[in-house]
């Protein structure tokens, strides 16, 4: 049994787990929140979005669960662990990258997950596996000339999906300036991967601005390169009509 303290209002319930961080449940979209928090966006008992410090594109959510992880956690690592757990429960969540989490960290996250799962379930999270597959996105040649716009975390860009594994990022794109740090003050996996991509294209970058078109291999690479990920990139790429790349290409 885990000890906790808490408080509540008509819009928010807070569970303070002391050394294990805290969990907040919101009945409406919070106006203020930490950029280091992990959010589960809920519609009734179903997850419709996951993100780190990101509540964009969640207008249809009916409630929000905020997980403030313990100080010794690397937020991006636990976020990856969490997405894999949600995929195992049947949620259609894109996890296009692979991370290697140490056995010690894996055991730590497993124990933490067992501790907080009863609270998340009490807040309405369903984790019983269902028969749903991971969403698949179909490349369509008709979209190759569509300029998809990104405006997220200080980054701005125009991107073309030219071929299945070819995403053209146009010159003039503005990159997020700094990779986010974990609570321990280190750069997490997403930040390290994004910095590596930028190093590979350092000749095309000047003052955090792309001075020449570049080609990346996936939506995930685009997100890592521009804003160090932390959100579903398929929802950040928007057509001139306002539709996301997910909406235009997801297969039923």
Image: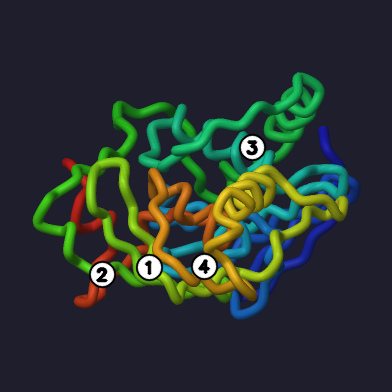
Q: Earlier in the sequence, mark 2 or mark 4?
A: 4
Give the camera-side residue of 23 and 135: 135
Find residue 42 and report its horizontal and vertical position in percent: 45, 56
Between the C-alphas of marks 2 and 3, the distance is 41 Å
Q: Is residue 192 left or right of residue 44?
A: right
Category of crowding for the residue at label 1, using alpha-carbon neighbours closer than 10 angstroms: few (below 14), some (14–19), many (at least 20): some
Element under disc 1: loop
User: Which circle marks residue 170 in the picture?
Assistant: 1
Tell me, yes or no, if residue 228 can be seen here: yes
Q: Quadrant of the C terminus?
A: top left
Residues under numbered marks 2 and 3 in contact, where contact means CB atoms less than 8 Å apart = no
User: Can you tell which of label 2 and label 4 is closer to the viewer?
Assistant: 2
The residue indicated by pointer 3 is 117
Category of crowding for the residue at label 2, using alpha-carbon neighbours closer than 10 angstroms: few (below 14), some (14–19), many (at least 20): some
Find residue 122 and report its horizontal and vertical position in percent: 59, 46
Between the C-alphas of marks 1 and 4, the distance is 26 Å
Q: Is residue 173 left or right of residue 60?
A: right
Between the C-alphas of marks 2 and 4, the distance is 24 Å
Find residue 146 and report its horizontal and vertical position in percent: 20, 66
Category of crowding for the residue at label 3, using alpha-carbon neighbours closer than 10 angstroms: few (below 14), some (14–19), many (at least 20): some
Residues under numbered marks 2 and 1 in contact, where contact means CB atoms less than 8 Å apart = yes
Give the camera-side residue of 151 and 118: 151
- Extreme left residue here? 142
Query: Residue, x 82% and y 32% (percent of image)?
Result: 1
The residue indicated by pointer 4 is 55
User: Which circle marks residue 147 in the picture?
Assistant: 2
């Amino acid at each position: 049994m885990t000890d906790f303290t808490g408080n509540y209002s008509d819009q928010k319930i807070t569970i303070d787990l002391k050394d294990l961080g805290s969990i907040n449940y919101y009945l409406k979209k919070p106006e203020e929140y930490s950029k280091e928090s992990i959010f589960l966006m809920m519609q009734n008992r179903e997850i419709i979005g996951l993100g780190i410090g990101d509540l964009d594109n969640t207008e249809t959510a009916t409630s929000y669960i905020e997980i403030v992880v313990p100080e010794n956690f690397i937020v991006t690592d636990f976020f990856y662990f969490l997405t894999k757990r949600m995929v195992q429960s049947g949620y259609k969540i894109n996890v296009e990258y692979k991370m290697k989490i140490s056995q010690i960290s894996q055991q730590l996250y497993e124990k933490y997950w067992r501790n907080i799962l009863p609270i998340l379930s009490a807040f309405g999270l369903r984790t019983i596996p269902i028969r749903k597959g991971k969403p698949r996105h179909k490349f369509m040649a008709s979209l190759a000339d569509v300029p998809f716009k990104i405006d997220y975390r200080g980054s701005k860009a125009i991107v073309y999906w030219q071929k299945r594994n070819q995403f053209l990022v146009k010159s003039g794109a503005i990159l997020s300036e700094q990779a986010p740090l974990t609570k321990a003050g280190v750069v997490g996996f997403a930040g390290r991967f994004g910095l590596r991509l930028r190093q590979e294209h350092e000749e095309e970058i000047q003052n955090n601005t792309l001075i020449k078109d570049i080609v990346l291999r996936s939506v995930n690479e685009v997100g890592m390169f521009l804003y160090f990920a932390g959100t579903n990139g398929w929802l950040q790429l928007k057509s001139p009509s306002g539709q996301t790349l997910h909406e235009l290409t997801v297969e039923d």
